[in-house]
Image: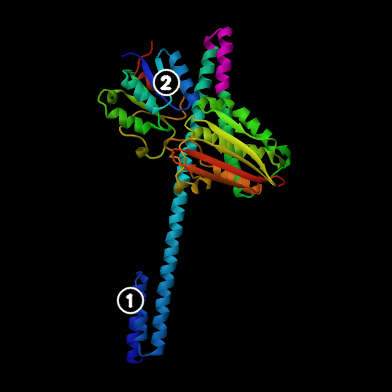
């Protein structure tokens, strides 16, 4: 499995920071700012080994993105790690998301989570 | 005891039990049908007691509904506030981790360029956190009635222009062009930092909800009043939400899509009213919103 990661987050600074960090660790990183843009990339054939997904985004949010991606058998099989600040109530998280990075997370936590799905160079 | 009295006492006890369970079979007609005047009086008293109880129960349940709505709004606020605080903290944490790694690995030349870029991002997160904390402090100041205005002679156009200068980059990143319509200075006795704060809030809302379309800002002097407005062509606000958005912790846009504390417009309204002015909105869903502030020039 190659180490390609797609980051979906509307926060410019966090997106750039994640990209910088994962690039440095040898992953191939693509970033988009909306769920819509991510779906377009995936439909055009992009096949990341992992998607890092923010939940709170304008227009198409993380829940809506997941719903659309899971309706597609190929896209639905790509592992998704959710990045969220929400703590309370598991029902707030889209099922069946097992992997959640609770904000704020640090580099060690991010890299160990990512390493479970994608191999860096 | 007279046997009529005994049966009346029994009926009264039954009615009391009935009233206790929220019902009452006494009616004006059943009272009128009583032979004895004191029995009529007692039953009428019981009916009144029942009606008073019903009224206070209804009032209690409507207060309870209000309380539940307030708790819902507060819970929603806490959830969004945690997102707003934790996102910049995440970026800060990752950036600081990265800075340490860089210092260990890179040579001095590469260091300078990446260092300044990373410090820029770090600085922006600190600004975001500072603004969040300032909003929370404003809430406590306003709710405890400790807002103090400090007015000075100033040109509103200049106050607005300085904010626009500060926002140039952010508006560009959001894709919105800013156009400032004005015809001459608007002098007055203003609390410059509070006017700046209110306008900043309206402008950041316009950028956030403006879908990257052009935003028009205007100022005008109207007799003893000064007016400014911010007009976007974004998602707009449904009529049923337009009165809500000026309330504490309330927001029209869903928190599953948009960040923000739901405090900005409430704080703005409180500040504008403290200045003796008004704030209002005209909006249409999917067409955009115009927020207008009117304040006295010699407040």
In percent of width and height, residue B264 lies at 55, 41
Check the residue under mark 2 and report the chain it is in. A
Quote the CA–CA distance across marks 1 and 2: 71 Å
Please tell me whether mark 2 sits on a helix, a strand or a loop. Answer: strand
User: Residue B287's x, y, as percent?
Assistant: 46, 38
Q: Is residue B120 visible?
A: yes
Q: Give percent across and percent down for residue B37.
A: 40, 89
Answer with the quarter of the image where residue A45 lies. top left
The image shows residue B24, relative to residue B240, as above or below, that is below
Read off the chain for label 1.
B
Instruction: Tell me, yes or no, if residue B141 can be seen here.
Output: no
- How many C-alpha atoms fall within 10 Å of the one at disc 1: few (<14), some, or many (≥20)? few
| Residue B120 part of the magenta segment | yes
Q: Is residue A19 above or below residue B63?
A: above
Q: Which residues are magenta?
A: B104-121
User: Which residue carries the number 1 mark?
Assistant: B25
Where A90 sits versus B225, above or below? Answer: above
1 or 2: mark nearer the eye: 2
Residue sitting farthest toward the front: B183
Magenta span includes A16: no
Q: Which residue is mark 2?
A: A31
């Amino acid at each position: 499995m190659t180490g390609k990661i797609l980051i979906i987050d509307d926060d410019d600074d966090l997106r750039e920071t994640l990209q910088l960090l994962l690039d440095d660790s040898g992953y191939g990183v693509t970033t988009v700012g909306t769920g819509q843009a991510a779906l377009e990339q995936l439909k055009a054939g992009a096949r990341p080994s992992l998607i890092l997904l923010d939940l709170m985004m304008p227009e198409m949010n993380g829940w809506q993105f997941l719903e659309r991606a899971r309706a597609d058998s190929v896209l639905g099989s790509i592992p998704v790690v959710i990045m969220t600040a929400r703590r309370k109530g598991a029902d707030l998280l889209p099922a069946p998301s097992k992997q959640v990075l609770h904000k704020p997370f640090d580099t060690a936590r991010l890299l160990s989570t990512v390493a479970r799905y994608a191999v860096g160079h | 005891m007279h046997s009529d009295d005994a049966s009346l006492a029994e009926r009264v006890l039954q009615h009391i039990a009935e009233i206790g369970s929220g019902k009452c079979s006494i009616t004006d007609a059943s009272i009128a049908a009583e032979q004895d005047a004191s029995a009529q009086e007692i039953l009428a008293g019981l009916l009144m007691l029942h009606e008073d109880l019903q009224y206070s129960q209804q009032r209690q349940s409507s207060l309870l509904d209000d309380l539940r709505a307030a708790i819902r709004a507060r819970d929603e606020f806490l959830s969004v506030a945690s997102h707003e605080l934790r996102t910049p903290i995440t970026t800060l944490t990752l950036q600081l981790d990265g800075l340490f790694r860089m210092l260990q690995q890179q040579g001095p030349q590469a260091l300078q360029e990446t260092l300044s870029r990373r410090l820029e991002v770090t600085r922006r997160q600190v600004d975001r956190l500072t603004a969040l904390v300032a909003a929370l402090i404003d809430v406590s100041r306003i709710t405890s009635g400790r807002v103090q205005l400090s007015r000075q002679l100033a040109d509103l156009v200049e106050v607005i222009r300085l904010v626009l200068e500060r926002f140039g980059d952010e508006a560009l990143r959001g894709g919105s062009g800013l156009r400032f319509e004005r015809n001459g200075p608007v002098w007055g006795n203003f609390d410059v930092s509070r006017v700046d704060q209110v306008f900043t809030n309206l402008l950041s809302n316009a950028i956030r909800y403006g879908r990257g379309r052009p935003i028009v800002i205007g100022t005008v002097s109207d007799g003893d009043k000064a007016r400014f407005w911010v007009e976007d062509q974004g998602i707009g606000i449904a009529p049923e939400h337009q009165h809500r958005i000026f309330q504490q912790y309330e927001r029209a846009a869903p928190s599953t899509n948009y960040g923000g504390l739901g405090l900005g417009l409430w704080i703005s309204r409180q500040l504008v009213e403290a200045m003796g002015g008004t704030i209002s909105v005209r909006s249409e869903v999917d067409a955009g919103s115009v927020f207008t502030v009117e304040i006295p020039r010699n407040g």
